[in-house]
Amino acid sequence: MIVSYPSFRKLFDLPDIIDYEEFKLKLRVKRNQKVMPYTPDEFFFARNDFRLEQKEQYYQNLYEICVIDRENTLEKWFAAHIQIDNLTKHMNFSLDKNILKDDVIMGRLQNKGRIIKNINFDKIFKTKKYSNEDTMSILDELSSMFSNYIINSNLTIPNGFEKVINKDLSTIFAIMRGTRHRASIFNPYTYGWLLQHYFDGERVIAPTAGWNSYQIGFHQTNWKEFTCIDVIDSVIDNVKTIADYYNDNLFADNKIVNGYCCPSEEIILEEKNHYDLSLCSPPYFNLEIYESDNPNQSLNNFPVYHDWLEGYWNATIENILPTLKKGATFAFVISDHKDIFANIGKENYTERNISEDMLNICKRHMAYKKTENIAWANFSTLNGKQGSGNLEDMHILVK
């Protein structure tokens, strides 16, 4: 189940080593979706500041990072973001740390998301945003950097330039991570804490699998049954592998776990009046595009927003609702967002009030109870989420 560095390394078909002068000729800069028409030399000459004086050292360091020491750079990136050294630590944890502070659920406290990034790394770090034309995923960035010598424009501005001069890989990775795209991850600790300390019941169903984070959170609780639905086959394959791991290695808890690889808007479940809770963070329409070539992805079937609300979300509710007991809870985590693909750097974003729109559809079928707030990391303009600071809505309704 756990991904090792050799598996990660297979993603990169690196070219033969080139000499320093050829590297300088090929070096280009990418700003957002576009490779700039100018060379780094032309950029530094135009700025005419300290970067012009230090540009040769800058190029030499980039040559070492991207060419001569590229294996070491890639291995350090893997170690910093994906590597798992102690599996038990990531798969078995207590939920005794309270994450409710001043009526806000602090979703990033006790973060246990690293295991999710490991077992789904090739999908999570390849996720696009807003458009299938997006070329700003983290794996795209790494591939461009080591295969085509195209670097992030943030490494040419003064702060990024200095990090290259100092060969500060940790901060260089942080710059790449903060300005490029990957899928959001729901903290497994938060999901488990919500089950154990907030909601009541024994059986939970999730209309999305959340990259397996919900299941790992579930296994830390005294809840007895978990069912998830997803259209990414590798994620559903992980469901049984994870359940077997817990039964064989840790608790022998013999919990009931089911995973269905099927669109939630199409699935027909045999269980009726069975589950105490439905809890997930559904897709945000086009904020994140998972497996863009997967014909079962809701965005591929319903590319127009209002069609997606009806064809995906309303249909999903209609399929989940019969499986819930009378009086059961239906909860989902969502945030409004901005569609910024075509307007990066401009103010005229397309804003989607997706939280309210999805809640209003739920109100057709269920009684609204309340909305809680979950705080994550600060939302940046790049990731497109908006609203009140770093808060997302957890809407709670009752059948």
Image: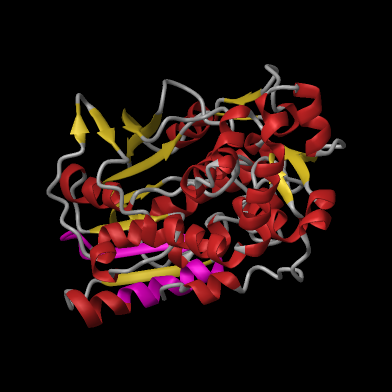
Indicate the quadrant where residue 398 lies. top left
At x 71%, y 68%, the residue is 14
Q: Looking at the picture, does residue 244 appear above or below residue 276?
A: below
Question: On the picture, is 277 further left or further right than 231?
Answer: left
Say whether residue 30 is visible: yes
Question: On the picture, is 156 further left or further right than 390?
Answer: right
Say whether residue 135 is visible: no
Q: Quadrant of the C terminus?
A: top left
Foreground residue, 13 or 218? 13
At x 59%, y 42%, the residue is 164
Q: Quadrant of the N terminus?
A: bottom left
Question: On the picture, is 1 further left or further right than 122?
Answer: left
Foreground residue, 56 or 213? 56
Foreground residue, 158 or 184? 158
Instruction: Give the magenta-colored segment's residue range.
Output: 220-243
Name the spot of residue 333 as percent of width and height, x first: 40, 39
Count of numbered labels shown in the rendering: 0
Name of the residue lying farthest toward the left: 96
Residue 226 painted magenta: yes
Residue 224 painted magenta: yes
Name of the residue lying farthest toward the bottom: 248
Q: Looking at the picture, does residue 116 appear above or below residue 179?
A: below
Indicate the quadrant where residue 241 lies. bottom left
At x 83%, y 32%, the residue is 42
At x 36%, y 65%, the residue is 271
Name the spot of residue 312 as percent of width and height, x first: 59, 47
